[in-house]
Amino acid sequence: MRARIAQLVWLVCVLCALACALGALLVALKANTDNALVVFVKDAASAVDLGVFDRRDGVLKFDGENAATKNALVNWGLAAVVWLVIGRILDRIIRP
């Protein structure tokens, strides 16, 4: 039972990390913001960025040319790494 719960927790954390990474990639590629899938992924990344890694006002804030791309790549990239670390730690704690 605990092993299944640990797997579920790890899966949720991986999906959150994936949302952050895909959102950063879509910003970097300047994906079409009129596309519903692009909007969904970017909204999902904003929802799971833990507030600290917001792409507009996150841990690191860049100015100047390509600032939006740099902000998204760094802050959402860090959020993805943090989600993976949190997931692995919780997996180890929950698993018997």
Image: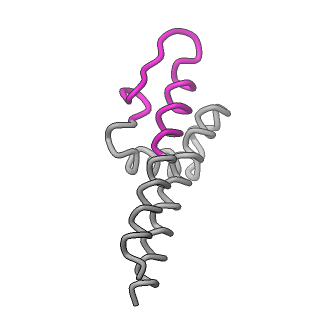
Q: Nearer the viewer, residue 55 or 1?
A: 1
- Which picture quadrant has residue 56? top left
The answer to if 81 sits in the magenta stretch is: no
Q: Is residue 21 above or below residue 5?
A: above
Q: Nearer the viewer, residue 36 or 25?
A: 25
Q: Position of residue 23 (x, y in %)?
A: 55, 43
Q: Position of residue 11 (x, y in %)?
A: 50, 69
Q: Residue at x 43, y 69 (%)?
A: 92
In the orientation shown, which residue stands out farthest toward the bottom? Answer: 1
Q: Residue at x 48, y 68 (%)?
A: 10
In the orientation shown, which residue stands out farthest toward the left? Answer: 51
In the orientation shown, which residue stands out farthest toward the right? Answer: 29
Quadrant containing the C terminus in the rendered view: bottom left
Quadrant containing the N terminus in the rendered view: bottom left
Q: Is residue 40 found left or right of 27 in the rendered image?
A: left
Q: Nearer the viewer, residue 17 or 81?
A: 81
Q: Is residue 16 above or below residue 24?
A: below
- Residue stretch in magenta: 54-79
Q: Position of residue 71 (x, y in %)?
A: 49, 26
Q: Residue at x 49, y 39 (%)?
A: 78
Q: Residue at x 42, y 71 (%)?
A: 9
Q: Is residue 23 found left or right of 28 in the rendered image?
A: left
The answer to if 67 sits in the magenta stretch is: yes
Q: Is residue 52 above or below residue 15?
A: above
In the orientation shown, which residue stands out farthest toward the front? Answer: 96
- Which picture quadrant has residue 27? top right
Label tally = 0
